[in-house]
Structure formats: structure tokens, C-alpha cells
Image (tube, rainbow, N blue to C red):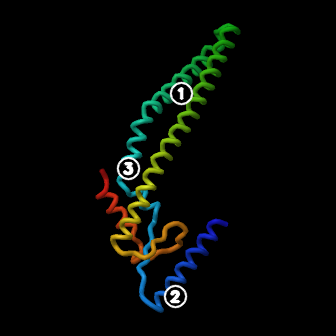
């Protein structure tokens, strides 16, 4: 429903601009492919690398724990026949406990990773919006559209300008 409303609103705006433009003057309209800008911005690459560096040690630790549990399970399967019933039960409880702990750690890892990723994306999105506004003002655009655009000709697509600006603006 929200998408339909946005499409209707944008269509109305474009119609009004076009109608007014034919009566008085022309307007410069641009379109931005936000996904393309986000994918090609150096800020997003830096954020991905930073998050990877930040979470890599925990990821390696989880992989090591998985291998350890796998080795313990293999030992249990191999030695099951020669171990006493009490030793089998203890080893099985140990495996279940370790799996439960690993699952909890993996869930926490995923939550932390998603939280950090979202945190960085919000920063980048704000920077992209500011860049779009700056480029639009500098290039004298009257209207810039982004979300909900089904088609934009290369003539109106200003995504490349935004990406170039972000590359220059990269600290």
C-alpha cells in the first residue's frame, strides 16, 4: 500500500512539474539508484572491511568450537561400544551442552553482527542523502527522485555523480 501511495505521489509530482514546466519554464529532474550508490560507495567498502575485521576473531572462534564438537561427536560414535553406560551418558550430555552453548554464541554473534552492520548502514545512508542533496544543489536539479522509481533514463540518472562525489568525499 505504501509503495502504491509513493508511486501515486511521485507520478503526481512529475505531472505537476511537467505541466508547470510547459507553461513557464523547464525543470531539471534527476533520479538516483540508491542501491547502486550504496554498493559502489567507498564508504560502504570501508564499513564492510571494518566490520569483517571486527568480527573475524569471533567467527574463527565459533568455527574452532564447531570443529571441536564434531571431533567429540566422532569420538563418541567411535568409542560408544567400548565405553561404559555412565561414560556414554556423560559424553553425550557434554556434547549436547557444548552444542547448546555454541548455538547461543552463534545467535549472539549474528545479532551483534546485524546490529553493527545496521549501525554502519545508517551512517552511510545519512552521508549518501547529504551527498545527493549537495550534488543536486551544485548541479541545479529541481527535483531528485529515488525510491519507487520503475525506470529512469540514463539522462536523468545522477547515481554516477553521487558515487563520484562520495569517492571525493571519502576521508
Question: What is the number of the mark on residue 19?
Answer: 2
Residue at image point 56% right, 24% down: 70
Marks 2 and 1 sit apart, C-alpha to C-alpha, by 64 Å
* Closest to the observer, 97 or 4: 4
Callout 2 environment at 10 Å: few (<14), some (14 to 19), or many (20+)?
Answer: few
Q: Secondary structure at mark 2?
A: helix
Residue linked to disc 1: 66
Question: What is the number of the mark on residue 164?
Answer: none
Residue linked to disc 3: 45
**Residue 37, image quadrant:** bottom left
Of badges 2 and 1, nearer the viewer stands 2
* Closest to the observer, 34 or 65: 34
Q: Secondary structure at mark 1?
A: helix
Callout 3 environment at 10 Å: few (<14), some (14 to 19), or many (20+)?
Answer: few
Of badges 1 and 3, nearer the viewer stands 3
Residue at the extreme bottom of the image, as rendered: 23
Residue 122, how many percent across, how many down? Answer: 48, 51
Rendered-image quadrant of the N terminus: bottom right
Residue at image point 31% right, 57% down: 167
- Say whether residue 80 is left or right of residue 71: right
Residue at image point 63% right, 26% down: 100
Does 99 appear above or below 56?
Answer: above
Identify the mark nearer the N-term, 2 or 1: 2
Identify the mark nearer the N-term, 1 or 3: 3
Residue at the extreme front of the image, as rendered: 24
Identify the mark nearer the N-term, 2 or 3: 2
Residue 69, how many percent across, how many down? Answer: 56, 23
Does 125 appear above or below 54?
Answer: below
Marks 1 and 3 sit apart, C-alpha to C-alpha, by 29 Å
Q: Secondary structure at mark 3?
A: helix
Marks 2 and 3 sit apart, C-alpha to C-alpha, by 42 Å
Amino acid at each position: 500500500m505504501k509503495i502504491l501511495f509513493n508511486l501515486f505521489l511521485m507520478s503526481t509530482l512529475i505531472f505537476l512539474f511537467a505541466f508547470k514546466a510547459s507553461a513557464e519554464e523547464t525543470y531539471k529532474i534527476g533520479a538516483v539508484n540508491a542501491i547502486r550508490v550504496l554498493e559502489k560507495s567507498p564508504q560502504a567498502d570501508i564499513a564492510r572491511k571494518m566490520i569483517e575485521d571486527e568480527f573475524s576473531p569471533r567467527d574463527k572462534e565459533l568455527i574452532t568450537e564447531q570443529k571441536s564438537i564434531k571431533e567429540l561427536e566422532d569420538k563418541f560414535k567411535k568409542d560408544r561400544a567400548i565405553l561404559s553406560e555412565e561414560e556414554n551418558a556423560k559424553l553425550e550430555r557434554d556434547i549436547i551442552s557444548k552444542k547448546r552453548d555454541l548455538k547461543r554464541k552463534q545467535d549472539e554473534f549474528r545479532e551483534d553482527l546485524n546490529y553493527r552492520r545496521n549501525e554502519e548502514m545508517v551512517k552511510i545512508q545519512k552521508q549518501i542523502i547529504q551527498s545527493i542533496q549537495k550534488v543536486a544543489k551544485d548541479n541545479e536539479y529541481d527535483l531528485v527522485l529515488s525510491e519507487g522509481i520503475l525506470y529512469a533514463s540514463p539522462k536523468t540518472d545522477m547515481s554516477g555523480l553521487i558515487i563520484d562525489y562520495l569517492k571525493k568525499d571519502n576521508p
